[in-house]
């Protein structure tokens, strides 16, 4: 069982996933149906087309036109730190270019600081379905469908031994007979759009991707444990910012939020605080990891931080985003004018 807590806020200051100008990395996917105990972890090149099988009713694969998510009604959702969006500029959605008419940064409902979420209005209507945001927070254990764009992972996991006597910890690739303290994957090749799954491990994890910015969200944990790992266990990595996360509730798919950041475990030692101390290729500064390219490993117990759109319902309504019933949510729009920051 995952031992994450609910109902208590944790503001986590972590490095944002790289955006424009950086080599994109993809979701690290472990195909549980093909998991083997010999160090081979499923199909490293799969999940690059719309989900099928038990997920075949998911119809928003093309809406996730990374880094933009098309919500419907000419509105896009975007992670602010990913890059610059200009009114009058052009964005590409599902292979078509559109002009930006308006952009608004959502504000943290608690302290009025800017979040890492932006709603963009475009000048046309893509031939895509409307996807509605959640209006209540996800619970620990709820399964999510994550879509990101980037590189393939290595087929085999890498094992590390860790010397905890140093500061930071010293990591080295484990040899035959060594005690293995951590496992993870390296990114190895060019970018691809890919989907995976994970469950909510922390339901109230606010995070900051820039000074003065607070985004209310939740977190998932990359798990190796059979009792926790989903069939297509996924972890975001550098470049997955603004990738979309969905949840199925009452038989309907809704968008839960966007991926924004990655971090280490939030559990107790042998790990140090919010991060894996000394994690290779991920230099630490003041307890914050800034992932570098290429070859950043994703370590089991790393976390993905995701915005919780239910915290921004009234602002989304005010900006013309279609939300699920009840329609009385429209009444909330009257009081949101001061919460929106137009850029």
Image (cartoon, rainbow, N blue to C red):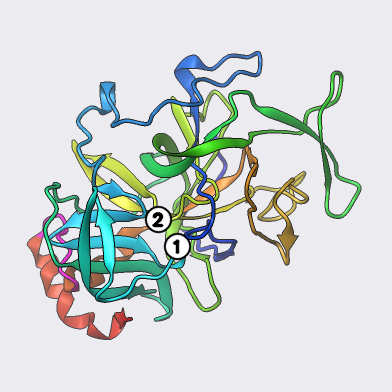
Which numbered disc flags the more N-terminal residue, 2 or 1?
1
- Residue at far left of view: 327
Relative to 157, residue 269 above or below: below
Chain part drawn in magenta: 319-326
Q: Residue at x 39, y 29 (%)?
A: 47
Around disc 2, counting alpha carbons within 10 Å, would you say few (fewer than 14), some (14 to 19), or many (20 or more)? many
Q: Quadrant of the C terminus?
A: bottom left
Residue at which label 1 appears: 82
Relative to 310, residue 85 above or below: below
Secondary structure type for disc 2:
loop
Image side of residue 273 versus residue 301, left or right: right
Around disc 1, counting alpha carbons within 10 Å, would you say few (fewer than 14), some (14 to 19), or many (20 or more)? many
Residue at which label 2 appears: 242
Secondary structure type for disc 1:
helix
Q: Residue at x 47, y 71 (%)?
A: 214
Labels 2 & 1 near each other (Cβ < 8 A) = yes
For residue 325: magenta? yes
Image side of residue 257 versus residue 158, left or right: left
Residue 136 seen in this snapshot: no
Dominant secondary structure, magenta: loop
Total number of numbered labels? 2
- Residue at far bottom of view: 338
170, 10: nearer the viewer: 170
Q: What is the x, y in percent for residue 337?
A: 23, 84
286, 124: nearer the viewer: 124
Q: Quadrant of the N terminus?
A: top right
Q: Residue at x 86, y 24 (%)?
A: 178
For residue 95: magenta? no
Residue 221 seen in this snapshot: yes
């Amino acid at each position: 069982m995952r031992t994450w807590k609910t109902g208590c806020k944790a503001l986590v200051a972590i490095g944002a996933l790289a955006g424009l100008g950086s080599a994109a990395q993809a979701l690290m996917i472990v195909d549980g149906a093909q998991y083997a105990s010999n160090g081979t972890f499923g199909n490293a090149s799969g999940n690059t087309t719309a989900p099928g099988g038990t997920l075949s009713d998911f119809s928003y694969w093309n809406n996730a036109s990374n880094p933009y998510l098309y919500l419907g009604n000419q509105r896009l959702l975007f992670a602010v730190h990913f890059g610059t969006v200009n009114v009058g500029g052009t964005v590409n959605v599902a292979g078509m270019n559109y002009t930006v008419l308006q952009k608004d940064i959502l504000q943290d409902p608690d302290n009025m600081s800017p979040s890492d979420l932006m709603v963009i209005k475009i000048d046309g209507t893509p031939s895509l379905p409307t996807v509605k945001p959640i209006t209540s927070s996800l619970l620990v254990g709820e399964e999510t469908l994550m879509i990101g764009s980037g590189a393939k992972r290595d087929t085999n996991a890498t094992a590390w031994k860790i010397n905890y006597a140093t500061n930071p910890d010293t990591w080295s690739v484990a040899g035959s007979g060594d005690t293995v303290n951590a496992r993870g994957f390296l990114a190895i090749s060019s970018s691809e759009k890919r989907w995976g799954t994970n469950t909510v491990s922390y339901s109230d994890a606010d995070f900051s991707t820039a000074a003065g910015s607070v985004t209310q969200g939740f977190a998932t944990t990359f798990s190796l444990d059979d009792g926790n790992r989903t069939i297509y266990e996924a972890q975001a990595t550098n470049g997955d910012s603004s990738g979309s996360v969905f949840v199925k509730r009452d038989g309907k798919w809704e968008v839960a939020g966007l991926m924004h950041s990655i971090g280490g475990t939030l559990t107790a030692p042998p790990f140090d605080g919010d991060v894996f101390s000394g994690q290779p290729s991920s230099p630490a500064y003041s307890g914050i990891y800034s992932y570098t390219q290429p070859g950043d490993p994703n370590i089991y117990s790393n976390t993905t931080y995701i915005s919780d759109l239910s915290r921004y319902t009234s602002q989304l309504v005010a900006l013309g985003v279609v939300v699920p019933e009840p329609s009385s949510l429209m009444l909330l729009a009257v009081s949101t004018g001061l919460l929106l920051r137009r850029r």
